[in-house]
Image (spheres, rainbow, N blue to C red):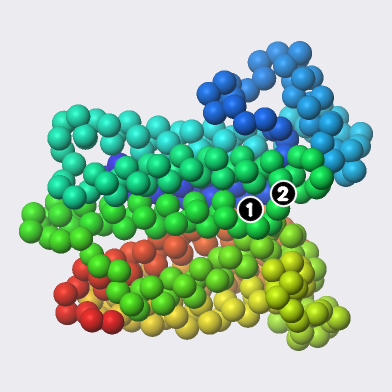
Amino acid sequence: MSWLFVVAALIVTMVAVGGITRLTESGLSITEWKPISGTLPPLNDAAWQAEFAAYRRIPEYQLLNQGMTLAQFKFIYFWEYFHRLLGRLIGLAFALPLAWFAWRRAIPAGYAPRLVALLALGGLQGAIGWWMVASGLSARTDVSHYRLAVHLLTALFILAGVVWTALDLRALAHDPAARPARLRPLAIGVALVLFVQLLFGAYTAGLNAGHVTDQWPLMNGALLPPGAEWSFAALVGDPFVIHFVHRWWAWVAVAALVVLARAARRAGARGASIAIHCAFGVQILLGIATVMSGVALTLAVLHQLVGALLVITVAWGAHAIGADRRVRA
């Protein structure tokens, strides 16, 4: 059980490092996917020159970063390398204890398939990460924001699944008769509302939509984005429209989270209720501060970090109402 909470903490760290990687435009610095041999960084000048030469062949360098020095390249390479290395560490942190517990026959009945599924999803996440990076290596100077959204949302889904499973196992450790919590309709509804907010947050990051204005609550002097076209294509591809939706759908998410927090409190999980309120309160303030700062790196990374923590609190609250047999919401 404790091992899963450690894995959850590593995933939160991974989300934050992913945010730094995106904000520093480091994601395309490694142009190959080598799951095994890529564990080691370049170890001599010749290896560094080879990596730099590969980067100079892609559109991002040719169109945006002409004249970059090797020292500057090493900076962006570090963040992408660290991001990938942390992904490998998370895989080991999950797989090795799982194998140990399986060998000791210490996995409670019914939990092995769920744990194996989470491990497999983690492996898939690595492939999704490369699929995302590959989108920016030939005809683009950036990765596809659609693929970035899949990558981020998959990470957050895995995070929620790990936390939920850890809570189930903790309850089982305290009471051998405890049954796994159920996913209640209320929790599903809140999760869907939050999913929309997280999706548009990913689109905002992928399209650099946070830079379209440094004003709040107005956008460049107006409530609605000036000159924006309101269509499905704009909803998924126009940075102004995406920014607008992300900043105002946040309040729909807040309303849903308040409902979940109150239900968790009624179920006896006062800690979950407080955590949900604190997380969305801090997240709203960080979102506004990020916009008004012109997307300052520290604030933007904290915004993504607290977003991951918010997912944990929602999983906690949803688990609480799903474990309380009195709740029928």
Q: Position of residue 72 (x, y in %)?
A: 80, 33
- Check the image and report above or below for 2 versus 263: above
Taking the view exactly as shown, the residue that stands out farthest to the bottom is 223
Identify residue type, mark 1: Arg
- Check the image and report above or below for 25 versus 265: above
Q: Which residue is mark 1?
A: 147
Judging depth in this view, the residue of 33 and 100 nearest the camera is 33
- Quarter holding residue 273: bottom left
Identify residue type, mark 2: Val
Q: Residues within 10 Å of mark 1 (few under 14, many from 20)?
A: many
- Name the side, left or right, on which 16 lies relative to 161: right
- Quarter holding residue 206: bottom right
Q: Which residue is mark 2?
A: 143
Judging depth in this view, the residue of 108 and 170 nearest the camera is 108
One can see residue 292 in this view: no
Q: Residue at x 76, y 86 (%)?
A: 223
One can see residue 208 in this view: yes
- Name the side, left or right, on which 178 lies relative to 11: left
Q: Residue at x 79, y 40 (%)?
A: 138
Judging depth in this view, the residue of 109 and 30 nearest the camera is 109
- Check the image and report above or below for 182 versus 64: below
